[in-house]
Image (cartoon, coloured by chain):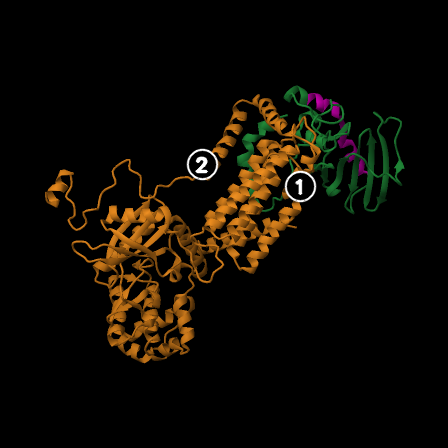
Amino acid sequence: MDTTTEGSEQGRRRDPDHPEQRRRPSGEPPALPHELGRSGKFFLLLVLYFIIVISAFLVFPSLESVFERWDHTRQQWITDLRTPGLTRVMLVVNGMTSSWTIRVIRWSVLLALIVFRRWRHLFVFLGAIIVTEIVAYNASTIIARPRPLGIPILTGWQGYSMPSRPMAGLAVSAVGAMYTLIVAGHARSIAKWAIGVVLVLVGFARLYLGVDHATDIVMGAVFGVAVAVASFRLFVPNDLFPVSYKRGKAAHLDIGGRRGEAIITAIRDQLGLSVLDVKPVGLEGSGGSTPLRIKVEATHDEPERYVFAKLYAKSHVRADRWYKLGRTILYGALEDEKPFQSVRRFVEYEDYTLRLMHELGIAVPRPYGIVEITPEREYMIVMEFFEGAVEIGDAEIDDGVIDQGLGLVRKMWDEGLAHRDVKPANLMVRDGELKVIDVFFVQIRPSPWRQAVDLANMMLVLALRSDAERVYAHALTYFSEDEIAEAFAAARGVASPTQLRNNLKQDGRDLLAAFRRMAPEREEVSIQRWSVRRVLLTVGVLLVAWLALGLVVSNWNAFA
Amino acid sequence: MRWRGRLGRVAAAVVALSALASCSARAGDATEANCPIEDGELFVLMAQSVPSATLIPCIESLPAGWSYGGSDVSNTVARFWLNSDRGGLHAVEVSLEASCRITGSVDVTNSTSEGGVRVYLNEFDLHPFSANKYFVFPGGCVTYRYRFGPEAEATLALEADEAVTFGLRTVLVAQVQDELGLTLCGAGAPPCVGGE
């Protein structure tokens, strides 16, 4: 039976080059299903418990006495165990929730974060603590539940009992310390268990001492943990802001374990390629995605080879949102872009720009398509890997490469495109051919300023490995003198990518000035553009910062 | 006890309160200290704070220009305070403790004093007005701490005196027993077990 016949029997014509490709039928889980772990399920159960308790009180007010007695009975089981010796032990254990212990934890974490210059973690830690303290306090005054009745209270307390503020304070501080100081992986898993054990022990001690009800303790601990987990996962996700004590950047998704298997399965099912090996590559130059070099088996049409893939998760969309907010505030209308709303749109855009440029004959990697790892959460964009290519900064630059670079910008100008990230790391040379990678920032119908900046950056990159005069002479073949003058009037400071600015500094020659001298005089193009949106955003951010500062100051007693 | 009746407002109120930068962990409920004591959760907490106290202070009615400031209750002391448009913020603080230091104070107990309450006064000053007034009774002591602003008249203290009164702890004990079937440990209640 030949391939076509076999495919027809199954209701479709299989691509003979990719026989393993298959559609995921309805009901079959995706490559990496989004599932809550055991701890997540447990946590959800606790949240459900509180929703039920609160709802029950609203619907049946007479339940209060039933609930109080139920809580009291549970507590009596514990207080019946009271002995002088055990009480001494429990008082020591309860010392974990003393204001001094919690202050020591908080200040130690703050000092460590200052030493390691982990500012973002520091601000999130501060914020999580303040939110926990304010919300727990206000919730306790509104709920206004007295301390346990019917039993002597054996230790000190402050204010109403539900939720337990010391438990919330300890939980948010301990979990915050874990997320800011302990490297993700085995060590963090151990820390999670250790914190869990400590919280259970301290909760038991407080129940034994009669200072909180069981419900107060659980509610306080759950709330503290929830605020910490939500804050750190939302604002400093590990795949973007990892805790690391090694040099270099490692802001990337873990590609081992279930995700690693899912990548292999998804590429096989969706692209029909058999994966032999997956390795992270070029992590230092990439903050917005997890770049991978994937070795695939030979197919009918191509030999065994490498493909390049970029793995995107929701955290990357959030990071892009913050990035765009920052750029809008700093540079105004020139960077006034709408953020992506989902990771699917994120990869769809890059796939589109890649296909567009490939179709236009620009030397970008050949696109293979998008691979879904977890619907709406993780996607991968797969493309050709330029094997044997070197970064332009390490390559020999001859007239041919210079012409290709300038021709590339001309082509983009003519097609109404801007790359917006022209820098040595995104320009590769293989056998005298210039290739462009990373087209995520490509913009269709960009501002003339953006296009002009592309030209200036390309000329600077080319001049780094040659000289300004030579590049300028070649540029006159593709651009008018006025266009070149506009490019260098537009390219000021932050308009150039950081890597290019650093390379220019290291080079020592003032290439920018050299180009400006050769080009006709032109007034500098201001990179600042003011709009109502920019003003409102700036005012909004300043207001939030002011409020945050006010919160820190007015709640300083949480630390001092 | 109606603490469960307030649970429904928690979510919305917490979000709203948390959004306010000016809110700090010291804000208070404007009505929580109003008499009678059997209607407020604050008084159960105050009774737990000083289990030996047979009387508990509460606000009978606030005169014009006075407002409730907030409360702070711990296992050693329970207090609430009043603000005045003339006397300033925190013009009067009312605190309940198991005992007070009355050394050097003047006994100003009058003949109409009830329930064995003795009244003392010290740290008296007219410009600006400041004074400490102690109400000593079996098992406890309530202090009125007057600290008025420089422009305030001393007669303002009379308004504050009229605003604050006392409730019997036994009433609260009975209320808790009736509603919840549980004992509010301390004075006026049967002994609580489990204290090793």
Q: Is residue A363 left or right of residue B24?
A: left
- Out of A532 and B109, give the one closest to the viewer: B109
Q: Residue furthest front?
A: A85
Colour representing chain A: orange
Q: Chain of mark 1?
A: A
Please give the name of the residue rendered at 69% of the width and 29% of the height, measured from the top-left corner. B44
Residue segment shown in magenta? B155-175
Dot 2: within a 10 Å radius of its alpha carbon, few (fewer than 14), some, or many (20 or more) residues? few
- Please say whether residue A531 is visible from this viewpoint: no
Q: Residue furthest top?
A: B178
Q: Chain of mark 2?
A: A
Residue B181: image location, x then y, percent: 65, 20
- Out of B148 and A56, give the one closest to the viewer: A56
Q: What residue did someone put label 2 on? A: A41
Q: Are marks 1 and 2 in contact (CB under 8 Å)?
A: no
Look at the picture and state if B68 lies above or below B167.
below
Q: CA distance from mark 1 to mark 2?
A: 32 Å
Query: Which amino acid type corresponds to the residue marked 2 in the rendered image?
Result: Lys
Colour representing chain B: green
Residue A536: image location, x then y, percent: 47, 53
In the picture, residue A352 is in which quadrant?
A: bottom left
